[in-house]
Image (spheres, rainbow, N blue to C red):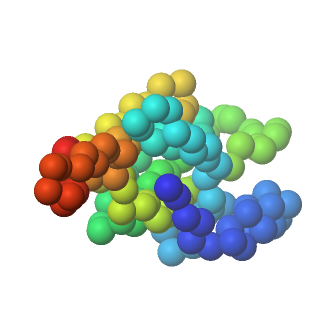
Amino acid sequence: MLMRTDPFREMDRIVQQLSGTSGTWSKPSVMPMDAYREGDVYVIAFDLPGVSPEAVDIDVERNMLTVKAERRPTGKSDGVQMELSERPLGVFSRQVMLADTLDTERIEADYDAGVLTLRIPIAERAKPRKISITGSGRKQING
């Protein structure tokens, strides 16, 4: 149901983690995700801990799903000296090519505990259906 659009994104993510670089709008970091089918619904879960729901942008154009988010530094007063900063900041993005068998008009999005979950129903036209044979030998499709 899903197709990977860039096989080298995981390598980019590892390099960014090792180098400590943050994503920008022109070159965002990759966000980790899981995708699975649950009955007649495809579920995609993106890890976005520390990101405000208002900072998440979800778009679908044709069959290309794009999720972008930005994690900004927390407000600190002038007297604060950072001792350790390991949590990545900046822009995160992920593009997923959706199959034609998914109903992109009815995508539902939920954000809870730093996880963005998209639920995409299987299109009715893609579900299995029975074909009955009429008495004249012609096949008739029952939807």
User: Which residue is most to the right?
Assistant: 18
Q: Is residue 97 above or below residue 103?
A: below
Residue at image position (28%, 48%) is 131
Number of marks present in the image shown:
0
Snapshot quadrant of residue 30: bottom right
Horizontal side, residue 114 vs residue 54: left or right: right
Horizontal side, residue 114 vs residue 122: left or right: right
Q: Position of residue 36 (x, y in %)?
A: 57, 41
Residue at image position (43%, 60%) is 98
Snapshot quadrant of residue 14: bottom right
Residue at image position (17%, 49%) is 134
Q: Position of residue 20 (x, y in %)?
A: 78, 59
Task: Tell me if residue 65 can be seen.
Answer: yes
User: Which residue is most to the front?
Assistant: 136
Front position in the image: 46 or 75: 46
Residue at image position (76%, 43%) is 85
Q: Is residue 131 above or below residue 74?
A: below
Front position in the image: 5 or 82: 5
User: Which residue is most to the left?
Assistant: 136
Q: Position of residue 53 (x, y in %)?
A: 40, 37
Snapshot quadrant of residue 109: top left
Horizontal side, residue 136 vs residue 121: left or right: left
Task: Tell me if residue 141 can be seen.
Answer: no
Quadrant of the image for the C terminus? top left
